[in-house]
Image (tube, rainbow, N blue to C red):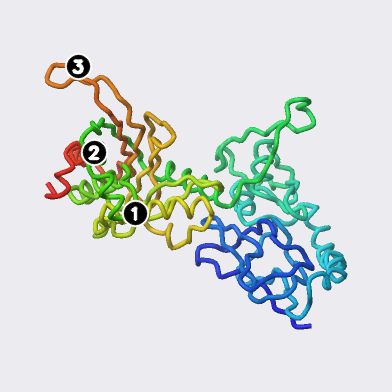
Amino acid sequence: MAIVEVKVPQLSESVAEATMLTWKKKVGEAVAIDEILIEIETDKVVLEVPAPAAGVLAEIIQADGATVAAEQLIAKIDTEATAGAAAPAAAAAPVAAAAPAAAPAAVANKGDVAMPAAAKLLADNNLSVSAVTGTGKDGRVTKGDVLGAVAAGATKSVAPSTIPTGVPTKSLPQVAAPSAQSLGDRPEQRVPMSRLRARVAERLLQSQSTNAILTTFNEVNMAPVMEMRKKFQDAFSKEHGVKIGFMSFFVKAAVHALKKYPVLNASVDGNDIVYHGFFDIGIAVGSPRGLVVPILRNADQMSFADIEKKIAEFGKKAAEGKLGIEEMTGGTFSISNGGTFGSMMSTPIINPPQSAILGVHATKDRAVVENGQIVIRPMNYLAMSYDHRIIDGREAVLGLVAMKEALEDPSRLLFDI
């Protein structure tokens, strides 16, 4: 028997642990080299774990849903076995694996083991781990368990002297959901947040609590852009193999405005303002696992075709869960296109540590006044949220006006005026 170990791939420096999703192979089944065995979800991306060698999956050490760390052993492959031959060993594997876990589980069921995020919440709310009933794997206390305990007023193990009077806890009030048994014919389903969804929630709350967010609005007549697209669409598609979309115009207009008003492309670092001499534009993309924001690097140096191809690539990767960490790291400004789903107006939330974000909406025919006459024009409402700590209303409004002017007269982009 020649055993090859399957381990968790290296995670990024900011990621301490990951969650096992669903095994694509069962013990005893044949696997080919580089065949994907399982996907592992971090709070940023989903990583695929390929088979390091061909053979038979001899043992699964970490089951679906387990929390794992980088380089941790999760399975073993027998390179000399044939499919089906490892099945007897497989039957014994779960029993063998369960034995050493029995003791920790017994302790965990008593609420003595907390997940990292849960441990922080316990400390923030002056709660003992034994005061909370764990519902996680092996009885571990999860973040949701702690939030539920806070809402229920769990204080049974808190020493009175540790709670200063008149000082509120750091967590916001939570409303406990009714139990499934009491719902009768009105069923509910409780599922844990994915790591990606939990990370998005954390960053959005961080943005709202650390930024002084204001939003400015303007309307744009999209007729010039639409006419230009219609005129050059066929030739563009033949030349570049991709269609001209609206997003490339919005990216170009945003870069045009950021060059005029550099503070919109800046970020806050403590008491310093960091002005970025490059333009990395984040494009918000919806995926089955949640919102992701891949980055167009050096967008000022990209052509319309480059932008359209890259956005199409991002969309495909997001749908397949194959965006890499490096593709979503950084960014100096973001664009969110709610118009794809029919949104008329919204106030986008800044993606920290950035200081501004452009919200794009649906283009609709509307009645507007031109030269004293009511006419029909394809209008789009733009919204730009900005951090008022470093961006004044003047820069925000003029920046959005610069985007409007570039879209209503795209030739400005050619002459950089």
Q: How many marks?
A: 3
What is the crowding at mark 1: few (fewer than 14 residues within 10 Å), some, or many (at least 20)? few
Query: Dot 3 corresponds to which residue?
Result: 374
Pick the residue in front: 286 or 62: 286
Q: From this viewpoint, which residue is outermost toward the bottom?
A: 2
Q: Amino acid at mark 1?
A: Gly
Query: Dot 2 corresponds to which residue?
Result: 225
SS at badge 3: strand
Residue at image coords 56%, 48%: 289
Cα–Cα gap, marks 2 and 3? 21 Å
In the image, is residue 375 above or below residue 108?
above
In the image, is residue 305 above or below residue 181?
below
Cβ atoms under marks 2 and 3 closer than 8 Å? no
SS at badge 1: loop
Query: Dot 1 corresponds to which residue?
Result: 241
Left or right: 144 with respect to 209? Answer: right
The image position of residue 158, as x and y in percent, is: 69, 47
